[in-house]
Image (tube, helix red, strand yellow):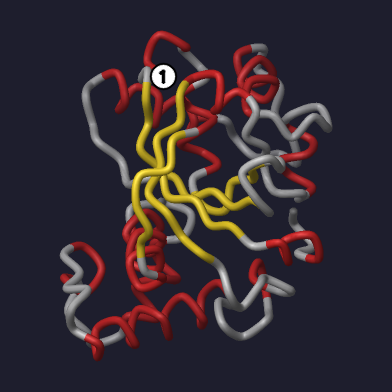
Amino acid sequence: MKIVSQVQEDEVIAEFLFAEVNSDRFKEGILNALGDHDLNLLIKPNLNDQAENQIRRDILGQTRGFGRNTDMFENFPTEVKWYKAFFEKQDLNEVMYINYSYWNELSSNTRLPLQASKNIMNQIEVFGVSNQGFLDINLALKNGKVFPRLIFVSMNENSRVVVLEGHARLTAYYLDNDYIPDELEVIIGFSDKFSVWDLY
């Protein structure tokens, strides 16, 4: 892991929403929360516009519980230092899923995308959820599509790294290791208080 520079929380929120508005699973909820606001708030965010930043913050709160201590952000630390970083292949091999039933089952309780990808290739499905989405993302990667940055969290640089946003995309890389880049730009947040986050 190579830390490059610090980023503001508003940028993390914008990246999170940009990824999820392009997700079949989460798009509808994000658009409903967006309401009458311009879609460009999500796909072309102006991070210098504080009114825009507040709208995005509200949307992430409404849809995922950010800043409200609910849903996936229950017990999430209120103060996190965020950074742009580069992860090499070996770094990515050690990144874990959140502690959540679906990802636990898909990865044979390892929480590792590499194991999950093996199960997917063996046509193992869990909870009746199709694996087609992973295959579609993998094909898009092979065709050169550029996806939003993955968002990771950790207690510190020496602790385990957990995916906050981008589980499906990270898994899709492992369906064909040749398409894992030598260095992948990500966003990572650090806080000692991740120790009490239920999903860590």
x and y percent of residue 106 in the render?
72, 32
Residue at x 40% of width, y 68% of height: 13
Residue 142, above or below 6: above
Of residues 20 and 165, the one drawn nearer to the viewer in this rendering = 165
x and y percent of residue 50 in the render?
25, 87
Residue 65, above or below 187: below
Of residues 180 and 37, the one drawn nearer to the viewer in this rendering = 180
Which amino acid is tagged 1?
Answer: Ile
In the shown orientation, is residue 35 left or right of residue 16? Answer: left
Can you tell which quarter of the image residue 11 is in?
bottom left
x and y percent of residue 154 in the render?
64, 51
Q: Residue furthest bottom?
A: 51
Residue at x 54% of width, y 48% of height: 152
Where does label 1 land, which residue?
180
In the shown orientation, is residue 2 left or right of residue 118? Answer: left
Q: Residue furthest top?
A: 178
Number of on-image labels: 1
Residue at x 23% of width, y 21% of height: 143
Can you tell which quarter of the image residue 161 is in?
top right
Which SS class for mark 1?
Answer: loop
Residue 150, above or below 139: below
In the shown orientation, is residue 102 left or right of residue 179? Answer: right
Question: Badge 1, how many Cα within 10 Å: few under 14, some, many 20+?
Answer: some
Residue 167, above or below 118: below
Residue at x 74% of width, y 53% of height: 200
x and y percent of residue 181 in the render?
36, 20
